[in-house]
Amino acid sequence: MRVKIAYTVDLEEVEKEVSHRMTRAVNDLDFCYQELIRLQMDLDTKAGTLDNHISLIDTIRIKMAKADQVFEDCYLILQGLKDTRSKLEEKENEVQDG
């Protein structure tokens, strides 16, 4: 079950926070890549058991899905940042024009 956690950071820190958030997802994807290469070699050489191969593929799929969820969160955060910056720019332009 996923839960939403909300906290605040300074506007200037949003991109840095997103970067930190992405680190875990990138590490998970790196794990997936390394394990897929190993699995592919095991399948080519008939090493390991079928049960282990099935289990590893499931683990990889779960890690990839979790990484995708993190990337979706990051996407939404950055989209919100873009919208906020646009609104702030519009207000500045109104003040300058007014």
Image: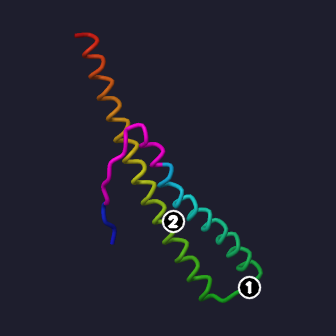
| Residue 82 x/y as whole percent | 37, 36
Report the number of numbered marks: 2
Lateral position of residue 80 relative to residue 70, left or right = left
* Sequence-wise first label, 1 or 2: 1
Residue positioned 53% across, 76% down in the render: 59
Q: Which quadrant: the N terminus?
A: bottom left
Q: Place residue 70 in its image quadrant.
A: bottom left
- Residue 19 pos. (x, y %): 50, 49
Look at label 2 and name its amino acid. Answer: Met
What residue appears at the point 77 percent right and 81 percent down from the top-left corner? Answer: 45
| Residue, disc 2 | 64
Q: Quick one: which residue is furthest to the top in this view? A: 97
| Marks 1 and 2 close (CB-CB < 8 Å) | no
Q: Residue at x 29, y 22 (%)?
A: 90
Q: Which mark is residue 59?
A: none
Give above or below for 56 relative to 83: below
**Relative vertical location of residue 69 with respect to residue 89 in this rendering, above or below:** below
38 and 98: which is toward the camera? 98
**Residue lying farthest to the left in this orientation:** 98
Q: Which residue is mark 1?
A: 47
Q: Which residues are magenta?
A: 5-18
- x 67%, y 68%: residue: 34
